[in-house]
Image (tube, grey):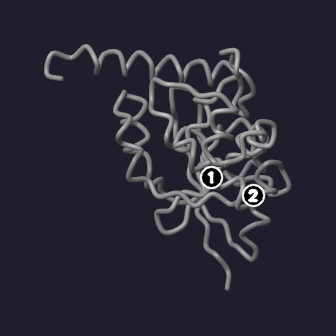
Amino acid sequence: MTLALELSRMASPLGPLILMHHANILHLLDFDDQYRSTGDNQLDHQADPLARILKSYRPYSLTNAENPFEKPLNAYFAGDFSALAPIRTAPAGTHFQRSVWSALGAVEPGNTASYGTIARAIGVPKASRAVGLAIGANPIAVVIPCHRIIGANGSLTGYSGGLPRKAWLLAHEAASAAKIAASPTR
C-alpha cells in the first residue's frame, strides 16, 4: 500500500520551513534551504537528507498540501512553547535514534543538556558520540528539540540548520522562559 505523504511550507523567523506529514502526523520539519527544488514547487527527491528519510516510507506518494501545523508553530515562534505539545510526530529512524529523540523532549524550553546527559538518560552513558549522530539525524527540527543539546563544556555544537539558527532558538526560548518566570501572575 502506498503511503500518501503531504508536503507543506511555511515562513518562520528563521527562514522558510518544509514539512512532510500524513494524517496530521508530522514526519519531517526542516529548514527549506536544506533541499533543492525542481522549480515546480516540488522537491528534488534525490536530494539529501530527504532522500534518506523517504526511503523509510516506500512505497509513497508526495503531494503539496495545506500546512496543518502552521498555527502551533507560529504560536511557538511567538513564545508559547506549549503549543508544540499536541503535535503528533512519527520520525523515521532506528530504535536507538527514536529513543534519543524521545529523550530530547525532557529538556524543557529555556534549558539545555549535553550529549552525555542524553546518553545517560537513555541508559547508555558511554554513547555520547552515538547520541550526537542520532541527534544530527533528527528529521523533525524545533518540535523534537535537538537545538537544546550542547557540548559538555557549554559550547554550541552541530545543528543541521546551522549554528546561527540554533543560537536564535536557544535565545528565543531563554528570553520567553525568563518573561514567564518573571510574570506577576505566576
* Image quarter of residue 104: top right
Confirm whether residue 18 shows in the render: no
At x 59%, y 28%, the residue is 113
- Quadrant of image for the N terminus: bottom right
Which one is nearer the viewer's eye here, 68 or 141?
Answer: 141
Q: Is residue 167 left or right of residue 119?
A: left
Give the structural element (helix, strand or loop) at label 1: strand
- 1 and 2 marks in contact (CB < 8 Å): yes
Q: Amino acid at mark 1?
A: Leu
Residue 146 x, y percent position in the rendering? 62, 36
Give the structural element (helix, strand or loop) at label 2: helix
At x 74%, y 48%, the residue is 39
Please give the residue where the numbered disc 2 appears in the rendered image.
53
Residue 178 x, y percent position in the rendering? 35, 15
- Quadrant of image for the C terminus: top left
10 Å neighbourhood of mark 2: few (<14), some, or many (≥20)? Answer: some
Q: Is residue 180 left or right of residue 92?
A: left
Q: Is residue 136 above or below residue 68?
A: above
Looking at this view, name the residue that lies furthest to the right: 46
Which one is nearer the viewer's eye here, 124 or 42?
Answer: 124
Q: Amino acid at mark 2?
A: Ile
Please give the residue where the numbered disc 1 appears in the rendered image.
28
Residue 179 x, y percent position in the rendering? 30, 16
At x 41%, y 15%, the residue is 175
- Distance, label 1 to label 2, CA atoms, is 8 Å
* Image quarter of residue 36: top right
